[in-house]
Image (cartoon, helix red, strand yellow):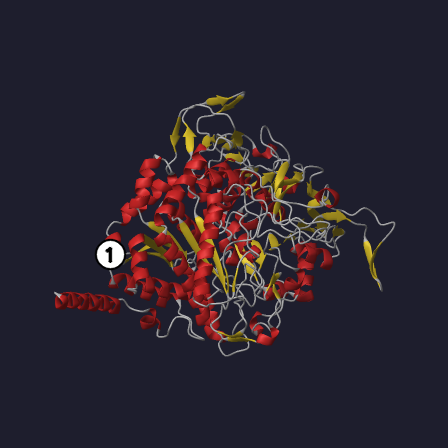
Amino acid sequence: MKNFVSCMLGLFFLASTSLNAQIPKPSDTFGFEVGADYKLADYDQMLAYYDKLASSTDRVQMIEIGKSVMGRPIKLLFISSEDNMKSLDKWRTISEQLSRARIAPDEAKKLSIEGKAIVWFDGGMHATESAHAQMTSELMWRIASEESDEMKKIRDNVISLVVPVINPDGVDIVVDWYKKNLGSPYETSRPPILYQKYVGHDNNRDWFMNNMPETKAVTTILYNQWYPQIVHNHHQTSPAWARIFLPPFRSPVNPKIHPGVTTGVNLVGSAMANRFAMKKMPGVISGTAFSMFWNGGMRTTPYYHNQIGILTEVAHATPTPRFYDPEKKPKNLRGTPANGTEIFYPDPWEGGESHFRDAVDYMLTASMGILDLAADKKDEFLYNIYDMGKDAIENKAEAFAYVIPREQWNPSEAINLANILMQGGVEAHSATADFSIGDKSYEAGSIILYGAQAFRPYLTDLMEKQDYPDQFLYPGGPPQPPYDLAGWTLPMQMGVSVDRINESFNTSTEAITSKLSYAKGAVNGDGDYIFSNRDNLSALAVNRLQKAGYSVGQLKADYNNNLKGSFVVKGKRNLKNEVSKLSDELGIDFGSVDDISDVDYTELNKIKIGIYKSWQANMDEGWTRWMLEEFEFDIDTLHNKDIKNGALTDYSAIIFPSQRPSGILHGSSESTMPKKFTGGIGLDGMAKIDQYAKAGGTVIFFDAASDLAIQQLGLPVRNTISNLESSDFFIPGSLIRMKVDTDNRLAFGMMDEVAASFNRSRAFQVVKQRKSGEGGTEDIADAPKANVNEVTAYAEKDLLMSGWAMGEERYLKNKSAMMHIPHGTGDIVLFGFRPQFRGQPRGTYKLIFNSIYMGAEK
C-alpha cells in the first residue's frame, strides 16, 4: 500500500511538472526575462505571448474586448482552475446577481458560498510607467502554472481577469522611443507626443465619461458584465525613495462611498503591506498623496459601484538601472518620517541599486497579496458587494429618482448624459406616457433614473453637486489640494436640465436596454433652410453641409421665430434629402425660408482650423483635437515650424490649447530632448501670429495660453488672479457659475448661465492702455477705453456650483471669464477656463464653435 501511495504521488508530481513545463514562460517569446535591465517587449511580442499562453492550458481563456484608438486589439484573459474555466458564465452570472442586489439575502448567502471571487488586474495604462505592461505577462504565467498550495487555493476560489495592456498604442510609442534613445543622453526621457493619441495621461481621468474607446471597452466589462469585487490598477511611481505606495489612502473619502468599500480598501491594503513585511521587502508607504474623494479614475470609479479599487504606485519606471546614494536618504517622504517611526511607513528603504526587475517583483507581490486574501475571504467579498448594493437600494434618505425631461435647451446632451450613465452600469427607464409630479408635467420619452439601485452611489455622485471638505496643510496655511478634481457634477457641466425627485411617484415606464439614439427632427418645406444653433450637434450639421458643397451662414438678427446665430443653408441640388438625413440622425429641425433675400445673415467661408501642438506632450491639445474631430471640423496640427513659416491665411481660426507660455515660446532644451524636438515658436513665431490676427485672422487661447497672448500681443487685459497666494485664493478643479452675454456673437445659442470648468484657471479685467519704459510697462493715465468685449463673466454671487473654492467672492466675482478683443482687422479670443476640459463641460462647447464661426465669416 505504501508503495502504491508513493507511486501515485510520483505520478501526480510528474503530471504537475509536465503541465507546468507545457505552459510557456514570457521569456520564451520575449527572448529575455521580464524586468531585465535595458529590455522592453513591444505589443506584438506581448500579443504573441498571450496567444501561446491561452493555447497552452485549459486554465486560461482569452477574448478581445475592443480596439484602442489606433485600432490595436485590447485583450482580456481569464485564469482559474480547469474546472472553474468550464463554467465561466455561471461565475459571471453569480457575480452580476450579487452586485445588482435584486435577490433575497438567503439566496445571496447561498450564491456567495457557491460563487468565486472575481479579481481584476490591469497594466499598461500610463505607458511611460513601463514596468506593469511587462509584468502582467509574468503574473498571468504564474497564476496559470505555479503548483504551490497557495496558488492552487487561488485558482480554486478566484477567477482572475487580466487586461495586461489597457493602452496598447502607448506601450509601442514608449518602447519605440526607449529603444531609439538607448545609450544616448535621452535614454530615460519621455516621448514628445501623447502616449494615447488624444489624452495621454488623462486616459486615467476618463472613467465616468468614457470618451475613449479603451475606457469604454473596460467599463463594459467592469460594470455591465463581470462586476469584480476587487479591481487592482497598477501604476508607477511611488514617492521618491519609497518602493511602493499602497492603501490605505489619505483623507478625505467621498461620503457617497459605502463605508464597507473604504474599510475593504484598508483591509486589502493592510494584507498587501503585511505580505511585503514578511517577505522582507522594505519601502512600503501608505496614507499619502492619494485620496478616495474623486470619481473618474480607474481605481476610484469602482468605489461608487461597491467594488474595492486598489491603486499601487511602484518605484522604477524605466529599464535603465539607477543608484540611490544611502547618504542622501531624505528624512521625510512627502511629510512622512523615514526613520521607521511612522505607522504608514514602518520599514523604510535605505537606498542602493534599483533595477527594473525590482519594480516587477513589487508588483507581483502586491498582486499576490490581493489574490491570497480574495481566495481566503471569497465568501465574504461576494456577500459584501451584495450587502452594499442592497443598502443602496433601500436607502430612503437619498433621491427617489432623477428625471431628465424631454424638453431641453440642448437635447442631444440630455441623451448623451443618459448614455454616459448607462455605460457606467446605471439602470434607466423611459416614460411611456405623459405624467406629472406635483405641478410639473413631463412628456413621454422623459428619462427616469430611479435611486433604488445598487449603483446609487455612482448615480448620485454624478448628478449631485460635490461639497469638498476644507483641508489645509497647517492652521492658517495654504490648502491641501485635492487629488485631481473637487467638483464634476455632470448636468451642470453638460448644460442638461435634471429634476431631483425626493417623493415617490408612479408612472408607466419601460427599461432602457440599449444605447439611446437622438429623437428624429422635422424638415418643413423646400428650398433654403434655417436651423437652430442651440444644440451642439448643429456644429456637426454645419460641417457636413459645407463638406457636401452647400453654402452655410449665420443669422445676424432674429428672423421670424429663429434667433440670431441660427444657421442658414442655401438650397441647391439635393438639399432636402441632405437635411432630411441630418434631421433623422441628429434630431435637428429644419424650417424652410420663403425668400432668403429677406434674411439678414453672414455667409461662412469653408471652415478650417489650425491647432498648435508643442513638442511638449500636451493633454489639453489632445482633448481639443478630439473634441473638434468628434464634430468633424477640418483641422490641421501646427507645429513650431508651421507657425514660424507664417503660411496661416488658410485658417478660419488658430487655437492655442492651455499650456504655459514658456512651453509655447521655448519648448524643451537640448539637455532634455533630442534637438529635433526642442524649442518653441519663439518671438518670431509670435510675430507671425500677431500678423495673422491683424490681417483678419482669429486666434483663440485657452486658459494658461491666454497668459501668452496678454504678454506678447500687448492686449489691454490682465489676469487679475495671477499673483495671488494659494492661502488667499484657490480653486482646484471645480465648477464655477458663469454669466453669459447671449447678445454677443460669440455666445449665440448659449444659456445665460452655465458652469465653467475652473482648474486653477484665470480671470480677466480690462486695463488702461500701457506704454513700455525702462521700468517695464505702465498705464497711460488719459488713455481711451480699450476696445474689448466681455463674452462671459464669473457670477456676482453663489459662484461655487460644485467642488471647493476659497477667496472666490473677493477675487473672482464679476471678473471676465471670456473676452473678445479686436486686433487689427482680426480677433483675439481669450478663455480664462478650459471650455473643453476632458470632454466634460459640453455646456461651453458652443463658445468655441462661435469663436470659430467668427473667423470663418466672409
Q: Look at the image and tell me whether residue 857 can be seen.
A: no
Residue at the outermost top position: 439
Measuring 54% from the left and 72% from the top, which residue is drawn there?
350
Q: Quadrant of residue 386?
A: top left
Measuring 44% from the left and 65% from the top, which residue is drawn there?
362
Disc 1, SS: helix
Closer to the camera in the image, 612 or 525: 612
**Vertical position of residue 200 compared to residue 437: above or below:** below
Closer to the camera in the image, 841 or 202: 202
- Counting from the top left corner in percent of width and height, residue 312 is at 48, 59
Q: Look at the image and tell me whether residue 436 can be seen.
A: yes
Closer to the camera in the image, 625 or 194: 194
Measuring 53% from the left and 69% from the top, which residue is drawn there?
349
**Vertical position of residue 789 compared to residue 60: above or below:** above
- Counting from the top left corner in percent of width and height, residue 575 is at 46, 39
Residue at the outermost front position: 2
- Counting from the top left corner in percent of width and height, residue 633 is at 52, 50
- Counting from the top left corner in percent of width and height, residue 800 is at 65, 41
Q: Is residue 616 left or right of residue 20?
A: right
**Vertical position of residue 245 compared to residue 254: above or below:** below
* Total residue callouts: 1
Residue at the outermost right position: 782
Q: Mark 1 = which residue?
A: 82
Crowd band around label 1 with a 10 angstrom C-alpha radius: few (<14), some (14–19), many (20+): some
Closer to the camera in the image, 275 or 795: 275
What is the three-letter code of the residue carrying label 1? Glu
Q: Quadrant of the N terminus?
A: bottom left
